[in-house]
Image (spheres, rainbow, N blue to C red):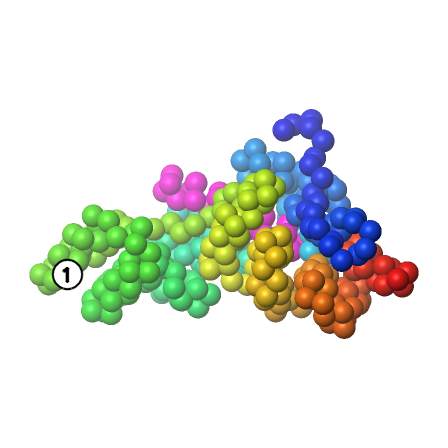
Amino acid sequence: MAGERPRRATFWLKSADNGFGTMAFVSKWFGFGHDPSFDDGVRAFEKKDFDVAMGYFRASASGSADRALKDRAKSYLAGCLGRMARLHFDRREFKDGWNLACEATEVRPNFADLWLLRARFEKALGKWAEARESIEQALKINPNYGAALILRGVLLFHEGETQTGFRSVEEGVKLDDRLMGKSWIEGERAFRKGEFLDAMSHFEEIEPRGSDIHDILAKGDELAKKGEWLAASNLFKAVTEIAPNYADVWIRLGQCYLEMSELDSAQKAFQRAIACNPEFAEAYALLGITARRQDDEENALAAFRKALELDPNHPIASQEILYRRKY
C-alpha cells in the first residue's frame, strides 16, 4: 500500500535448544529495509507496475553490497522482464517482447520458463534455429518440462521430423496432464491419419506459456506468513522444478521443512542452495541451525563459521557463535 510502512522482512523459526526460550530470526524473507531501490521495486511490483519496478531492481542488482539481496533483485528483475514480455506477446509486438525475453534469460539464465518464453517469441519471429536453441536450454534446465517438450515437438514438426516431434509432444502431455485437452486429442488423431500439417497446427494451439515463478512464489510467501508450511512447501517445490538453480527458493523450501521438523529434507534443501550459490551466507547459517537440531554441534559450528566468513555481520551466525562463547 502506498504510504504504508513496509512489512518487516523477517521470518522466524523456533530456536528450541538455546536454553532461554528466545526466537532466532532466520531470514530476511523479502529483503526489505536494506536497500531503498529494492524496497521501491517490490512496492511497484506488488502494484503490478512492472516497468517502473524494473528500473529499481536494475539499480539494486548493480549497486547493492548485500550478495543475497543483489541476487534477489536479479530474480525480481527477471520476473518483471518476463511479465512485460508476455504483455508484448499478447499484443503481437514480437520484436519488443523478444528483446525483453532475451534480457530476462541473460539476467537469470537458469530459469526454464524464461527460455520457453524466449523460444515462443523466436518461433513467432521465424527465428527457427534460435527457437530450437532456446527450447533446448529450457529442457537442459528441466528435462521434464511438459510445456517445453510440446513446443520442441512443434519445432521438430516444422523441420520435417514428424515422428520425433510427435513423441516430444506426447511426452509433454504425459508429464503434464493439464495440457491434455482438445488440441492434443485432435492433433493426435490427425497425426495417426498421416495429416502432419493439420497435426502440427493443433499442437501449436496448445502453445503453453509455462509458469510464472513469481506468481507461485508470492502465493508460497503468503502461505508461509500464515504458517501453512505444507502448502507453502509444495509451491516452493514446484518452483524448484521450473528453476532448479534458484538458491533463494531452496532457502524458502528448507525453512518450511524446518518449521515442520523435517530436518533431513531441510538439510538437503540448504545444501542445494549452497550448490547453486557457494557464497550464500544465509544457506550456511540455516544449515548450521539444522545441524544443531540434529545434535550435530561440530557441523553446526563449522556452518556458522563459514556463514560469518562470507558475511561477518550475519545475524544468525553471529548470534549462534556468541551463544557458544557464553555457554
Give x and y (percent) for residue 121. 39, 52
Of 7 and 183, nearer the camera is: 7
Q: Is residue 58 magenta-colored? A: no
Q: Is residue 307 left or right of residue 262?
A: right
Of 197 and 322, nearer the camera is: 322
- Determine the residue positioned at 11% across, 59% down: 195
Please state the extent of the stretch shown in magenta in the rendering: 70-92
- Badge 1 element: helix
Residue position marked by numbered label 1 in the rendering: 191
Q: Is residue 212 above or below residue 163?
A: above
Give x and y (percent) for residue 163. 20, 69
User: Few, some or many C-alpha atoms within 10 Å of disc 1 (few <14, some 14-19, many ≥20)?
Assistant: some
Quarter occupied by residue 107: bottom right
- Determine the residue positioned at 76% across, 69% down: 297
Look at the image and tell me in which quarter the C terminus lies: bottom right
Circle 1: residue type: Phe
User: Residue furthest toward the bottom?
Assistant: 298
Residue 244 in view here: yes
Predominant SS of the magenta segment: helix
Give x and y (percent) for residue 261. 61, 57
Q: Is residue 223 left or right of residue 212?
A: right
Q: Is residue 257 above or below residue 227?
A: below
- Determine the residue positioned at 70% across, 45% down: 10
User: Residue furthest toward the top?
Assistant: 3
Of 120 and 304, nearer the camera is: 304
